[in-house]
Image (tube, rainbow, N blue to C red):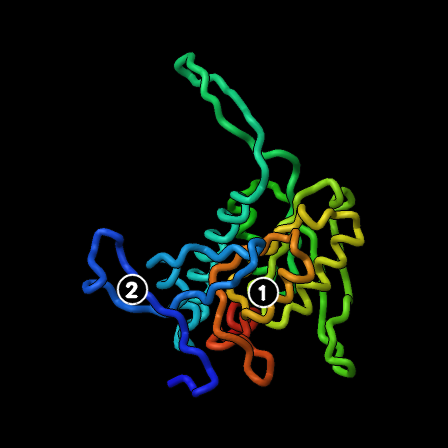
């Protein structure tokens, strides 16, 4: 049960639209964030089921990887929807024309090591031969603040749309520093999209307020942070569960 000071988790009936609510189970859904640049994936039965699997402490590593990859694919697909397109008319094999669109400009991915590297394959699955840079940020034990240790980015990154990859957004310190690095390399703020599996409200708000032109695409905003700044209810350490446990 939530404490008197802790708000109840938002919930709704989840299931096919053609079924009445009485025939649908009730599930916890994402907390809403009142910032236009934070986009939360639709809380569909599929997404909630996938999140349930990766949150479960009893889910083994193979299943954790499989279901995480499915969510990552949904995030990448939605992230690509936020990129600008231009008109593009083509001819079909039957001699007709089709008025379509194509992406405007080049893209690249940038993963925040190490957990963010788990999202790289999902981006490659959607964008063949995409270039991917890396940023290593770790917490300084003396100051408890994030510190940049390493970055390797495409030389022409300032000319690209950047999909920044990191599965967990807690306080937002690492992601905020990563955006600072990208901006220092000449990437316009409005050309950065941050793809994230689970965020805290605090991290999402910090991010939205500091970088209002960066679009955040997340699968779920959780209830908050505990005294150790862990996302709750969360899913534990994503990197450990994906790579080692």
The residues bearing labels 2 and 1 have C-alpha atoms spaced at a distance of 25 Å
- Report the residue at 40% width, 66% height from top: 29
Describe residue 158's horizontal placement relative to residue 69 as left or right.
right
For label 1, the SS is helix
User: Which quadrant: the N terminus?
Assistant: bottom left
- Would you call the spot at circle 1 few (<14 residues within 10 Å), some (14-19), or many (20 or more)? many
Residue 62 visible in the snapshot: no
Residue marked by disc 2: 13
- Report the residue at 43% width, 60% height from top: 66
Residue marked by disc 1: 204
Residue 175 placement: quadrant: bottom right
Residue 53, given in percent of the width and then of the height, sits at 39, 68
Residue 210, given in percent of the width and then of the height, sits at 69, 61
Residue 14 placement: quadrant: bottom left
User: Is 154 located above or below residue 197 in the figure?
Assistant: above
Q: Which mark is residue 89?
A: none
In this orientation, which residue lies closer to the viewer: 156 or 43? 43
Residue 242, given in percent of the width and then of the height, sits at 52, 67
In this orientation, which residue lies closer to the viewer: 188 or 93? 188
Residue 242 visible in the snapshot: yes
Q: Earlier in the sequence, mark 2 or mark 1?
A: 2
Q: Are marks 2 and 1 in contact (CB under 8 Å)?
A: no
For label 2, the SS is strand
Residue 136, given in percent of the width and then of the height, sits at 72, 64
In this orientation, which residue lies closer to the viewer: 140 or 3? 3
Describe residue 108's horizontal placement relative to residue 18 as left or right.
right
User: Is 93 located above or below residue 100 in the figure?
Assistant: above
């Amino acid at each position: 049960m939530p404490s008197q000071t802790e708000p109840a988790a938002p919930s709704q009936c989840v299931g096919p639209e053609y079924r009445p609510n009485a025939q649908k189970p009730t599930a916890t859904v994402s907390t809403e964030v009142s910032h236009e640049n934070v986009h939360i994936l639709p809380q569909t039965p599929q997404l909630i089921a996938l999140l349930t699997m990766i949150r479960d402490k009893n889910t083994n590593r193979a299943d954790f990887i499989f279901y995480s990859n499915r969510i990552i694919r949904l995030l990448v697909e939605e992230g690509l929807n936020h990129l600008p397109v231009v008109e593009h008319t083509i001819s079909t094999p039957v001699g007709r024309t089709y008025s379509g669109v194509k992406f405007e400009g080049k893209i690249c991915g940038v993963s925040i090591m190490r957990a963010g590297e788990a999202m790289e394959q999902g981006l490659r699955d959607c964008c063949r031969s995409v270039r991917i840079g890396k940023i290593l940020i770790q917490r300084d034990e003396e100051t408890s603040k994030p510190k940049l240790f390493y970055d390797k980015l495409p030389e022409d990154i300032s000319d690209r749309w950047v999909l920044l990859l990191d599965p967990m957004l807690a306080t937002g310190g690492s992601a905020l520093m990563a955006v600072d690095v990208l901006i220092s390399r000449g990437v316009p703020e409005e050309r950065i999209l941050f793809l994230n599996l689970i965020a805290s409200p605090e991290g999402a708000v910090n991010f939205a307020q500091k970088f209002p032109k960066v679009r955040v695409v997340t699968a779920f905003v959780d209830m908050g942070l505990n005294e150790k700044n862990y996302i709750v209810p969360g899913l534990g350490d994503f990197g450990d569960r994906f790579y080692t446990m």
